[in-house]
Amino acid sequence: MNPSPFPEAAPDFSNPLGLLRACHERILQHCATLERLVGHLRDHGADADARSAAGKIHHYFSTAGRHHHQDEEQDLFPRLARQSLKLADLVHRLRQDHARMDHLWQQLSPLLATPSRIADLDAFATLVDEFASLHRTHVARENEELLELARHILSSDELKKLGKQMAERRGQPAPL
């Protein structure tokens, strides 16, 4: 617990593993909002609040969520997969999760872009449940296994390169 009355600053590109963990928290928050959206749509339809929430979820997973997967797929996973067969297997399973997430997102994205197009709320709820459940399981595996191992395996030079690549992907200045 932070004894300071000021909130802790979010990690930046100089702490790429911390930044990935923080992104995981935002992913889970957006998944929770997505799950609440189902109930809201049942009770109120695609009103202004539903459209606003759907828009925020859509924007997040279309931008920051996409960057996050690229950070892992292009920069973190290759660094770790070459360390051992155990890590290569873990990375393989995580890549499979990403492929399934992307498939589910392709189905969710147009519905969130235009919530009034959601004709079958039961089918939408099933899709949302699968998407959110997969993310919760995946984030737990990455936080507890992958990022914990990465913290011990990657050198400070590799972490600096990782942070630089993540910043460049977003058009941000590289950390010093």
Image: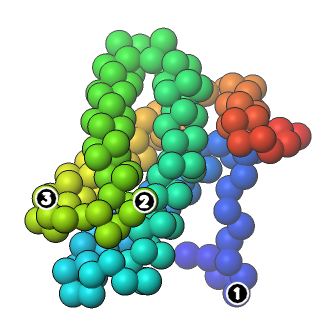
Q: Is residue 164 left or right of residue 28?
A: right
Give the residue furthest to the left. Answer: 122
Q: CA distance from mark 3 to mark 1?
A: 45 Å
Q: Which mark is residue 5?
A: 1
Q: CA distance from mark 2 to mark 3?
A: 17 Å
Q: Amino acid at mark 2?
A: Ala
Residue located at (55% from left, 20% from top): 79
Residue 135 visible, this orientation: no
Q: Position of residue 144 (x, y in %)?
A: 38, 45
Indicate the quadrant where residue 87 lies: top left
Instruction: Name the image quarter holding the N terminus.
Output: bottom right
Residue located at (14% from left, 64% from top): 120
Q: Position of residue 140 (x, y in %)?
A: 34, 49
Q: Earlier in the sequence, mark 3 or mark 1?
A: 1
Residue located at (52% from left, 18% from top): 78
Residue 151 visible, this orientation: yes
Q: Amino acid at mark 1?
A: Pro
Q: Is residue 38 left or right of residue 95?
A: left
Colour scheme of the picture: rainbow
Instruction: Name the image quarter holding the C terminus.
Output: top right
**Vertical arrangement, residue 89 with respect to residue 36, above or below:** above
Q: Is residue 27 left or right of residue 136?
A: right
Give the residue furthest to the right. Answer: 176
What residue does disc 3 label? 123
Q: Earlier in the sequence, mark 2 or mark 3?
A: 2
Indicate the quadrant where residue 127 lies: bottom left
What residue does disc 2 label? 113
**Vertical arrangement, residue 7 with respect to residue 25, above or below:** below
